[in-house]
């Protein structure tokens, strides 16, 4: 039913509800409280202690006196009593209480008590308890805004808690006792979950915290189960979907050209992908390996398989710099094997782009590397057989779908491989990659030494500067990262943050003999590339940069990473940054400057000192910041969770995963009547995903 037809909601108020995304009474019920206030505690006046917040049932003992203290400040006072004692009440600017509190009547008051100092003769001091601005209701109405656990809803301006509460109350009262439950009975009982009616009543108006927990557990379960069902169905559909069936071929000549042996993990990842692509079904695999684990070569090997099978392969990188670096590395490696590599990025001139596009369309380019530009209009592939996405978390679900749609010469979709260096905690992985097969690369190429990490403050500046000079003297290179001019920089950032440009100038003064380069997201593409190339060729000693270097660039000679204002970065991001050094044979270091005095910041950064393993850091990061911040809001392309909290609902997440499996084993298309409610929910969720979240 349209909420407009609820009592107390007319057209005008309905508009406010719509602002909150609530159009129907069903959506209103799904508008869960953000938090709750416990107003159940009730005490006798004699037992009150200053500073506590609770309810008191008491009778008004004197008429209210109102004093006009000054412009804009009216003070009303009275006192109330119960069988055990008396209590003063004061109200600031509360004209309504003057008419609503009557002497001799009994009310329930909810508020915080304080001790008012009273000076008596001889400077004896004793306290008198007072309750300031209590909420009051006639005692027979207790249970409305006092004497209960009060739900507090997300609001929008013009709408207050009472109005939302009232609307929800009306809908709950009308719920049929035998309303249809989304969860089938067997599943619900087997997991010890409550019935939908109980859940809805108690998530909104809990009788107790125990009942709230029971309600919440059930609703979180439902939310996660629906998501898992959706993801598993996507995955199942894909397994059934036919993919281009590749023939086994040898790529020994590729392996022979490499200056080193691939690690077992690299070989395993390649073999997983190749098996998928030779299976006849569609490959959709995530390769997750910490920074520096050598994913680029995995991509190259897999691409060679596709290309030797007569198809084109595409590699998408999150930044132009990275795309360019990949193109350079891979062209060097593959062109001698007779494979043509093409780069398509935004900074090319229109003419250049046209040429590259033509080569792609005619099949003159085998391996196409680019950024999102690959998705832009006008790129047609002659015979796209494989799409590799590097650092997947940077792309939304939508963009990936757009790329898949590119393989349109045949009805078959291209195989897809996603590479991520962001170690995803298991919980998030189940959600983000719930529809993919996963290969985890644990090992590192031999000879990698852990990067020595230090958290320091300004006091160490001099010593760090000497250290920079020493390393550069030995022929090494240094990165300095500042949290400023970023690709998504917002206007009006605080000026206290080191500005990269100023900073580079200051450094130039401090290190007169050193060659310093500057790289930030606001620079033009070709300028960026030029600086990056200078740095990777060893023509710069220090690169001052923003997080544009976060992903992927490879300079094995770089041995020191310095991060300014490190407290401003997420741990996983710091781990990525740190991964820019220690990629060669040299002992490498990471120095995190802590510019804030905050103890939490320090202990957070100490995690970086304690762990070198991206997975451990990711878990810590998730626990500290919650999933929203982990990727940045909405970057993962999934709808935000209403109730589920991925750091504390981990166990439910795993359970729903298993339960979703067994539901689909029994009823793959959710056509059984007991699963009708689930099917509706899953379809609804998937249509939201398709619409871009
Ligand atoms: P990432 O997984 O972070 O993308 P890269 O593919 O950029 O890592 O590889 C990091 C570095 O390790 C590169 O310099 C690469 O040449 C080197 N490398 C990759 N595989 C091996 C290997 N098997 N043995 C030695 N070095 C390797
Ligand atoms: Mg990489």
Image (spheres, helix red, strand yellow):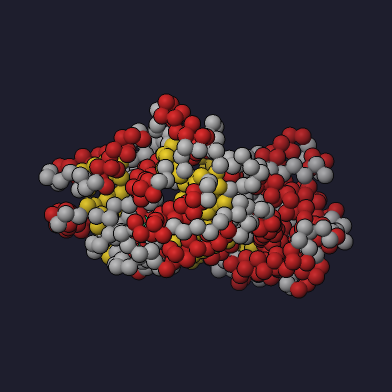
Q: Is residue 310 above or below residue 590?
A: above
Left or right relative to 84: residue 50: left
What residue is rendered at 67% in x and 53% in y? 241
Residue 346, picture quadrant? top left
Please name whichever residue, 137 or 645, is drawn nearer the observer in this view of the structure: 645
Q: Note whether residue 466 is visible.
A: no
Total marks placed: 0
The quadrant of the image that shows the N terminus is top right
Where residue 647 sits in the image (x, y, percent)? 55, 64
What residue is rendered at 27% in x and 40% in y? 531
Q: Note whether residue 178 is visible.
A: yes
Q: Is residue 567 above or below residue 408?
A: below
Please name whichever residue, 204 or 498, is drawn nearer the observer in this view of the structure: 498
Q: Is residue 194 above or below residue 14?
A: below
Where residue 283 sits in the image (x, y, percent)? 58, 56
Residue 377, picture quadrant? top right
What residue is rendered at 25% in x and 62% in y? 585
Please name whichever residue, 422 or 363, is drawn nearer the observer in this view of the structure: 363
Left or right relative to 240: residue 436: left
Where residue 634 sits in the image (x, y, percent)? 55, 48
The quadrant of the image that shows the C terminus is top right
What residue is rendered at 63% in x and 52% in y? 243
Residue 136, picture quadrant? bottom right
């Amino acid at each position: 039913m349209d909420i407009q037809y609820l009592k107390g909601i007319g057209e005008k108020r309905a508009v406010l509800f719509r602002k909150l995304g609530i159009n129907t009474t069903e959506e209103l019920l799904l508008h869960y409280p953000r938090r709750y206030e416990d107003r159940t505690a009730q005490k006798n006046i004699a037992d009150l202690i200053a500073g506590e917040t609770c309810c008191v049932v008491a009778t008004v003992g004197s008429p209210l006196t109102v004093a006009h203290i000054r412009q804009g400040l009216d003070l009303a006072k009275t006192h109330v009593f119960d069988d055990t004692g008396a209590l003063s009440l004061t109200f600031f600017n509360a004209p309504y209480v003057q008419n609503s509190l009557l002497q001799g009547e009994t009310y329930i008051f909810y508020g915080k008590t304080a001790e008012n100092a009273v000076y008596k003769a001889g400077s004896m001091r004793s306290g008198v308890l007072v309750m300031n601005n209590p909420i009051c209701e006639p005692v027979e109405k207790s249970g409305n805004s006092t004497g209960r656990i009060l739900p507090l809803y997300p609001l929008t301006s013009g709408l207050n808690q009472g109005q939302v509460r009232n609307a929800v109350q009306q809908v709950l009262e009308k719920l049929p006792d035998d309303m249809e439950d989304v969860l089938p009975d067997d599943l619900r009982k087997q997991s010890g979950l409550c019935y939908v009616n109980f859940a809805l009543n108690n998530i909104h108006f809990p009788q107790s915290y125990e009942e709230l927990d029971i309600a919440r557990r059930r609703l979180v379960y439902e939310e996660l189960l629906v998501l898992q069902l959706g993801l598993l169905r996507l995955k199942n559909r894909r397994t059934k979907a036919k993919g281009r069936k590749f023939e086994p071929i040898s790529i020994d000549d590729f392996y022979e050209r490499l200056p080193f042996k691939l690690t077992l993990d690299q070989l395993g990842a390649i073999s997983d992908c190749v098996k998928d692509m030779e299976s006849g079904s569609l490959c959709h695999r995530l390769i997750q390996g910490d920074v520096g684990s050598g994913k680029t070569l995995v991509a190259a090997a897999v691409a060679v398989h596709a290309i030797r099978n007569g198809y084109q392969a595409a590699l998408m990188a999150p930044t132009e710099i990275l795309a360019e670096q990949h193109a350079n590395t891979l062209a060097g490696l593959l062109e001698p094997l007779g494979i043509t590599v093409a780069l398509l990025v935004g900074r090319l001139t229109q003419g250049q782009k046209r040429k590259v596009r033509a080569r792609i369309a005619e099949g003159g380019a085998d391996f196409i590397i680019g950024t999102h530009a690959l998705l832009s209009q006008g790129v047609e592939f002659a015979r796209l057989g494989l799409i590799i996405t590097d650092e997947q978390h940077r792309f939304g679900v939508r963009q990936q779908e757009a790329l898949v749609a590119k393989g349109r010469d045949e009805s078959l979709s291209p195989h897809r491989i996603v590479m991520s260096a962001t170690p995803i905690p298991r919980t998030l992985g189940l959600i983000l990659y719930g529809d993919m097969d996963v290969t985890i690369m644990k090992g590192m190429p031999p000879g990698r030494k852990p990067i020595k990490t230090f958290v320091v403050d300004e006091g160490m500046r001099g010593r760090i500067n000497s250290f920079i000079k020493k390393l550069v003297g030995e022929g090494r290179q240094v990165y300095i990262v500042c949290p400023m001019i970023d690709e998504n920089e917002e206007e009006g950032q605080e000026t206290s943050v080191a500005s990269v440009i100023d900073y580079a100038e200051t450094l130039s003064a401090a290190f007169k003999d050193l060659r310093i380069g500057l790289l930030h997201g606001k620079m033009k593409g070709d300028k960026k590339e030029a600086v990056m190339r200078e740095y990777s060729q060893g023509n710069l000693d220090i690169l001052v940069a923003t997080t544009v270097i976060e992903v992927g660039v490879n300079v094995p000679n770089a041995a020191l990473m310095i991060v300014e204002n490190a407290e401003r970065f997420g741990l996983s991001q710091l781990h990525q940054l740190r991964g820019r050094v220690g990629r060669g044979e040299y002992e490498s270091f990471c120095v995190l400057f802590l510019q804030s005095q905050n103890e939490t910041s320090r202990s957070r950064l100490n995690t970086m000192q304690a762990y070198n393993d991206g997975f451990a850091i990711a878990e810590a990061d998730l626990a500290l910041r919650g999933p929203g911040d982990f990727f940045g809001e909405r970057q993962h392309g999934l709808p935000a969770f209403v109730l589920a909290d991925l750091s504390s609902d981990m166990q439910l997440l795993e359970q729903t995963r298993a339960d979703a499996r067994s539901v689909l084993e029994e009823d793959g298309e959710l056509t059984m009547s007991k699963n009708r409610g689930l099917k509706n929910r899953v379809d609804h969720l998937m249509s939201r995903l398709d619409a871009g979240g």
